[in-house]
Amino acid sequence: MKRESFNSRMGFLLVSAGCAIGCGNVWKFPWMTGQFGGGGFVLVYILCLVLLGLPAMTMEFAIGRASQKSPVKMYQALEQPGQKWHVHGYLALLGNIALMSFYTVVTGWMMYYFVQFLTGNTADLVYVKDVSNPFVSMITNPSVNVYYLLIAVVLGFTVLSFNLQGGLERVTKYLMVALFILMLVLGGHSLTLEGAKEGLKFYLVPDFSKINGSVIVAAMNQAFFTLSIGIGSMAIFGSYIGKDHSLMGESVNVILLDTFVAIMAGFIMFPACFTFNIEVDAGPSLLFNTMSTVFTKMSGGRVWGSLFFLFMVFAAFSTELAVFENILACVREMTGWSRPKGCVVCGIGIFLLSLTTALGYSVFHFQPFAAGTAWLDFWDFIVSTNLLPLGAFVFSIFCCYKIGWGWDNFMAEANAGRGLKVQNWMKPIFKFFVPVCVIALYIYGLVTFGWK
């Protein structure tokens, strides 16, 4: 089966950025920033992106480009005979599937709110403490969750049923351009609100007294989550590109686009929160209850609300497409199936597994951890708390030590082409700093996790 490739470098950058840009930026990053103290969390998050995310992404791209394989096969092309690195390839596939087991449902939530604002059905979307909670009403409604989940899955795999250039690359280009335009319009509008100054102070000025171990762990996990690093999501796109450009430079470009969207999401949300006296530490419901309430109170709120949730849909859908492609590529390499057949089988499988999350607040009650947790928390724990950081650790060991691929091989692959190069003085960062920090923060995160 001939290896597909992107039509252009811009296609690679936008699809890779689209994989990184998604619910992690526009849904999870703002509510985590609110819960973990504002500007201090943002500062630690950016440091984690630079010191941990950039090396990890460069290594993941390098493994993908050198192997020209999907995650389940990439180690087999690079490891020495008798080695077992390829086991992580199957864990990477599991991570992508687990991620989509809740991500598709969240994408459906975005679609639901967009449709409600577009059609003017916003009366039931106003949050009133101890009186009405629209977010809870939505997630406990089985028919709404299953219907929009089905739309999210069918749309995603329909796009991927075409070839790489005609499907994923073409659609993602349009999505990303529309996303950036909407983001700039909404961000500019939020800066005109009365509470903009106070909201930006909370968001951008660090309160160092609020920075602790839990904040650092949360920032690291969020950095890996938003970049989709550790489960091969970036490796697959590395396998689709040539050697015209060096991989550290490409990683910097993707991270800059991803971080720009995350920061802009905060510019959109926090001025609105402080203008309308909405709690910034509302958690996962921040985006839905807070912003829907804000828009219903705002002049022209129906239009702004429609634009905002359309922005959210585009962001979520760009990541969904990218991770679906990763799953599809793995399955096709293992089976030899055509794109259409793979899309049908993978689509049915993802839909059925995602029903655990879609019905987790109504039919399939399951509290894996503390009271109030559900299937979404379970899948997120598998991915964010475990497979993403552990995957970054494995990439680091594989790329930097002789028991794996080795530093020289990694450096030669990463530096092929024009652009920013990995330098020898960076070796201690890749070889020691990244794996030690990741494993230490991973252990700390497990010890302090809210199990009960």
Image (tube, rainbow, N blue to C red):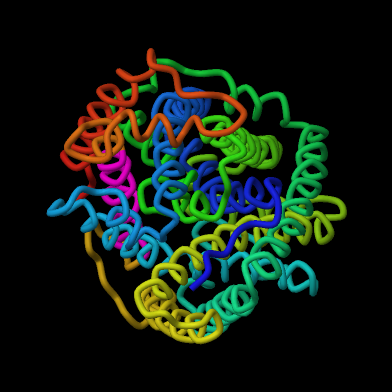
**Horizontal relation, residue 168 to residue 145: left or right:** right
Q: Residue furthest right?
A: 300
Regarding residue 33, the answer to whether it shows in the image is yes
Say which of 417 and 311 sits in front.
417
Q: Residue at x 73, y 56 (%)?
A: 173
**Horizontal relation, residue 178 to residue 9: left or right:** right
Regarding residue 37, the answer to whether it shows in the image is no
Q: Residue at x 56, y 41 (%)?
A: 243
Say which of 309 and 175 sits in front.
175
Q: Residue furthest top?
A: 425
Q: Is residue 111 magenta?
A: no
**Horizontal relation, residue 295 to residue 320: left or right:** right
Q: Main secondary structure of the magenta part?
A: helix
Q: Residue at x 30, y 32 (%)?
A: 214
Question: What percent of the width, then of the height, locates residue 360?
Answer: 36, 74
Say which of 34 and 447 sits in front.
447
Question: Is residue 267 shown above or below 122?
Answer: above
Q: Quadrant of residue 115?
A: bottom right
Question: What percent of the width, then of the height, locates residue 324?
Answer: 50, 68
**Horizontal relation, residue 183 to residue 401: left or right:** right
Q: Quadrant of residue 276?
A: top right
Say which of 235 and 209 sits in front.
235
Question: What percent of the width, then of the height, locates residue 254?
Answer: 59, 39
Question: What percent of the width, then of the height, locates residue 305?
Answer: 76, 57
Q: Which residues are magenta?
A: 376-395
Q: Is residue 377 magenta?
A: yes
Q: Residue at x 66, y 67 (%)?
A: 113
